[in-house]
């Protein structure tokens, strides 16, 4: 009996030892395939991307150098603000809101201070913001006293059960939200007054330049879009353009891209431009650049305007069919440029 037990004990010992030996054998492998940490120290950067615009239209190439430089300096400052936020890990939503707020305060652009005049010599402001993570969005239109329409749009998204608030109701919501208010004349600028006077003489709605927008991909891989405008000079009857219409002038979807448009709003609404670009990517497999080119150059007509877009892979498209578009782009690979014409 004694001799028969020996192999059994050896077998039992081996059975117990095998999993331990196997684990010890695999341990070094497991270490090898574990995710690398400290990539930042080794120079690897999590991708982010940002594009901004300050409006599209007939921007004469002989724009006085001083004026041109003012636009470029302002675009650069806005781009720096957004770049620094994204590089530090801020969300795309916070970034596009901050960049658009900055541009709303710059009298050069047709959003916030510096917004165009309506037919009645007033200002009516529109804005929208969208989060590509969950398609949540907020839009406001026909605002008269809200200093930063883009921030009220964000509050619609986050503090109301709705998507789109207009006119007196939106103003009442602004009161409840306690956002900063200014008298309507605060938005006046002499340039915009001159544009209204010229439009009134011609009895036409003048195509404006200077709507602002920002789109971004953050380090978490989330996309967001924001757009803000005073609309068209000499507009009346409560006219709204594409900017606050989700899918027309503003759209973001983590599956595809974030888009902000500028140009002749009626055309952008008819063609649901921003969503069309996203849909071409999602359903037809086009790249952002291909989709934006298709819509801006093949569906819209010359001089209608343009879009800025950032795709989920961090690629950027800046496409317009007008003479120029105030714009800028920056990304984690070191791109940083601002342009007006080609
Ligand atoms: N799209 C804006 C609107 O129609 C104007 C612009 O982008 O310049 O209200």
Image (cartoon, grey):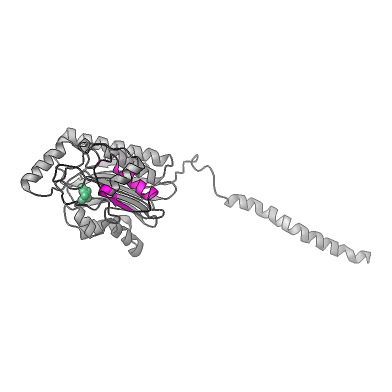
Residue at image location 34% in from the left, 37% down from the top: 80
Up-down: is 8 above or below 229?
below
Q: State which region is magenta.
A: 140-168
In this picture, residue 57 sits left or right of residue 280: left
121 relative position to 49: left or right: left
- Give the image location of residue 67, x and y in percent: 18, 35
In this view, the residue in front, 135 or 62, is 135
The percent coordinates of residue 101 (x first, y second) are 31, 40
Q: Which one is in front, 244 or 260?
A: 244
Q: Which quadrant is the N terminus positioned in?
A: bottom right
**Is 320 in front, or is 151?**
151
The residue drawn where x is 16% and y is 45% is 118
Outermost residue toward the right in this view: 1
Q: Residue at x 36, y 57 (%)?
A: 256
**Is 266 on the left or on the right of 11, as rendered?**
left
Q: How many marks?
A: 0
Q: Position of residue 158 (x, y in %)?
A: 39, 48
Point out residue 139 in the picture as x, y percentages from the top left corner.
31, 50
Q: Indicate whether 338 appears above or below 160.
A: above
- The reply to whether residue 20 is visible in this rendering is yes
Query: Could one spot residue 63 in this view of the protein?
Result: no
**Residue found farthest to the left:** 201
The reply to whether the magenta stretch includes residue 253 is no
């Amino acid at each position: 009996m004694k001799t028969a037990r020996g192999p059994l004990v050896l077998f039992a010992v081996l059975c117990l030892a095998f999993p331990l030996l196997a684990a010890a054998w695999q341990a070094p492998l497991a270490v090898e395939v574990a995710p690398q940490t400290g990539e930042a120290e080794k120079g690897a950067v999590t991708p982010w991307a940002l594009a901004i615009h300050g409006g599209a239209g007939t921007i004469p190439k002989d724009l006085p150098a001083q004026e041109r430089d003012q636009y470029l300096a302002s675009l650069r400052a806005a781009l720096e603000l957004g770049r620094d936020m994204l590089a530090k890990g801020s969300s795309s939503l916070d970034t596009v809101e901050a960049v658009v707020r900055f541009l709303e305060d710059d009298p050069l652009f047709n959003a916030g201070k510096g917004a165009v005049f309506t037919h009645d010599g007033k200002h009516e402001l529109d804005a929208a913001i969208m989060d590509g993570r969950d398609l949540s969005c907020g839009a406001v239109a026909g605002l008269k006293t809200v200093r930063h329409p883009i921030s009220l749009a964000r509050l619609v998204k986050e503090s109301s059960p709705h998507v789109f608030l207009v006119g007196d109701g939106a103003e009442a919501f602004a009161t409840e939200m306690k956002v900063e208010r200014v008298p309507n004349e605060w938005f006046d600028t002499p340039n915009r007054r001159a544009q209204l006077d010229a439009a009134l003489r011609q009895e036409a709605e003048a195509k404006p330049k200077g709507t602002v927008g920002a789109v971004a991909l953050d380090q978490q891989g989330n996309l967001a879009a924001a757009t803000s405008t005073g609309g068209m000079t000499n507009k009346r009857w409560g006219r709204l353009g594409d900017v606050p219409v989700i899918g027309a002038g503003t759209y973001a979807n983590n599956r595809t891209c974030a888009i902000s448009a500028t140009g002749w709003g009626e055309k952008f609404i008819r063609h649901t431009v921003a969503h069309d670009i996203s849909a071409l990517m999602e359903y037809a497999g086009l790249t952002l650049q291909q989709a934006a080119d298709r819509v801006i150059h093949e569906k819209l007509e010359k001089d209608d305007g343009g879009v800025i877009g950032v795709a989920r892979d961090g690629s950027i498209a800046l496409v317009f069919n007008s003479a120029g578009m105030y714009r800028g782009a920056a990304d984690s690979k070191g791109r940083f440029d601002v342009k007006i014409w080609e």
